[in-house]
Amino acid sequence: MLETALKGSRTYWSWVIFLLAVIGVGFISYIYQFRVGLGITGMSRDVSWGLYIGQFTFLVGVAASAVTIVLPYYLHNYKKYGRIAVLGEFVAVASVTMCMLFIFVDLGQPLRVLNVLLHPTPRSVMFFDMVVLSGYLLLNILCGWYVLGAERKGVPPAAWIKPFIILAICWAPSIHIVTAFLYQGLPGRHYWLTAIMAAKFLSSAFAAGPSLLIVISLILRRFTRFDPGWEAIQTMAKTSLYFLIVTLAFYGFELFTAFYSNIPGHMHSFKYLFTGIHGYTKLVPVMWICTALAAVALPILIIPQARRNETALGFAAVATFLCLWLEKGISLVVGGFIPNPFERVFEYWPTIPETLITLGVWGIGFFILTILYKVAVSVKEEAIFDKYGERQVRV
Amino acid sequence: MGISRREFLKIAGASAIVGLGGISAIEILHPGQFEASQVSRGPKALVGKRWAMVIDMKKLDKQTMQKCIDACHRIHNVPDIEKPKEEIKWIWKETFEHAFPGQEHEYMGEDIKHLPLLVLCNQCDNPACVRVCPTKATYKREDGIVMMDMHRCIGCRFCMAACPFGARSFNWRDPRPFIKEENKEYPTRMKGVVEKCTFCYERLAVGLQPACVEESKGAIIFGDLEDPDSEVSKILHSKYTIRRKSELGTRPSVYYIV
């Protein structure tokens, strides 16, 4: 099937070449980091994780969110998702790959990465994270590729794939729960030490993932002959909406606990993020942009007339995705380190090479996504659908 | 008979996965095969079951503190990096209000608030850093010392996030150019690994007290908590001592008399 990715329009090739250029610049920046060390980033003794681990955390969520498409389709036989289930799985493949790359570029001694396997340490959450992420990647490649292959041949997928699909569905939340456990089990980091972290991770993931798929679906509708289906897009919008509301509620619960209990340690990070402390305010604009984006996205998604407007929906989906990216991809990780264990403030802001490496990894993710989607779309452009949006299998 | 490229790739891929998984399986089922680096004890070695330290701030003046710091950093080839962002420190001065956040109050005199204390790795009995390390590069020895294997560390910095005491430093770049006078008796580090105080395990192995203890003119007392006759045990029994953030349950082995 991969050969279909080698034939494409001028727009397709321009996009691919653009991505390759971004990857190239990121790679050169990584060589620089590899030679000099992580000192080229904005991270420090006090904020020892930054943009890389933030992206990793956010993208684990995007990967897990494939379940919001795959579960209704396979477990509830929600036919409208028939056309896009594989798109969700391929987003998962690209996201998990990016996650692994972000961990890799964050390592001080990347060539020793296999030590994690040579000296497996089950008590370390990071060891578990690696196990569940690799498993999830393999499951999604298997399920996505196999089902698409069957669709191309015009036959229903064989029964043996079903258990793997069910396993992938159960597996999806686990990757994000384990990622939350990286943070929420650490003593002395008040901003992370909260039992609701895993729940908030899942809810924000299930809002961000569908919003990304909405944007992708709207692009596919415009640029290819494949239509993911208006009804499917509307359902994803509702999924995104409900989980966005839940996420905001969870965040509100955190604020209540911190400020009603009035325990200084619990309030510090929130104060740093929203107002700044001791005159240190680098992340304040980030948090308020994040808040504004949520305030814009919510009414559009809630009001049915607005949600059914293609342009407004696209706008709301982009706003939701960016809002949750700012929250989880930047403020969550950095905010947890500020103030430091001595209650001193050392701020963080990514450097240019760090940003280029980050863009490079995103470039690789979008490159994988583009190739996989090109294959999927080529297969699906040939398809005939019935009125439920289910593919008609040629007998 | 030949195999197609497709089949070859399938077999090779599967073998790689099984091979890597196999090593992990051996380690989990039969642990201890690949233990991290250790130092062998000399005949005069100091032997203890749980090493601990009491820092008597009443006896420590600023100059002595600086001597302790300098001795430690000189012996252990700790680089002198001015940039606070990339600073590496094993033992350093921190004011009371920052070393014991939450213990200060607004009526406290400035001299107490800003009283400098010596802080270092607490060699916790229940160390969060050891719990999170994905490669066992940081591990607890039987005598309670929380060790670092610089050759195993992958530089993920999970331990730095886990340590509630800010005791760990990371080599953000090659530290060697920043070492003023290299001590050939102790290894230098490379970029990309985490390091911290190790209670001078290398000095204990040859019967010496930790460097800071030696420089402190009796203000820092080092000994075995499990031995009721040791000086540290006697002090802890008779005097009021405090530990940093003891409420977190990591059971620090560094006690303070303030």
Image (cartoon, coloured by chain):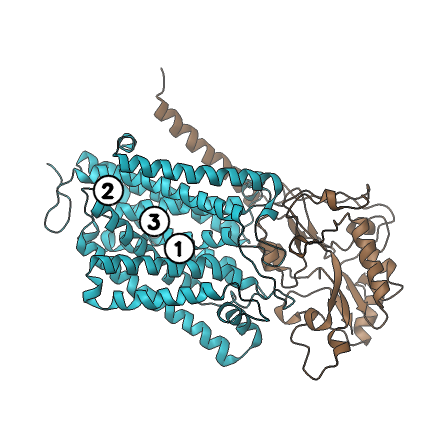
Q: Which residue is mark 3?
A: A168
Query: What amino acid is labelled 2 in the image?
Result: Ala
Query: What amino acid is labelled 3 in the image?
Result: Ala
Which chain does the brown colour mark? B
Q: Chain of mark 3?
A: A
The answer to whether B245 appears left or right of A335 in the picture is right
Query: What amino acid is labelled 1 in the image?
Result: Gly
Quadrant in the picture for residue B248: bottom right
Name of the residue lying farthest toward the top: B1
Marks 3/2 in contact by CB < 8 Å: the verdict is: no
Query: Dot 2: within a 10 Å radius of its alpha carbon, few (fewer than 14), some, or many (20 or more) residues?
Result: few
Q: Which residue is mark 2?
A: A159
Q: Chain of mark 1?
A: A
Apparent colour of chain A:
cyan
Q: Which residue is mark 1?
A: A61
Name of the residue lying farthest toward the right: B217
Q: In the rendered view of the protein, which quadrant contains the C terminus of chain A? A: top left
Query: Dot 3: within a 10 Å radius of its alpha carbon, few (fewer than 14), some, or many (20 or more) residues?
Result: many
Dot 2 and dot 1 within a common chain: yes
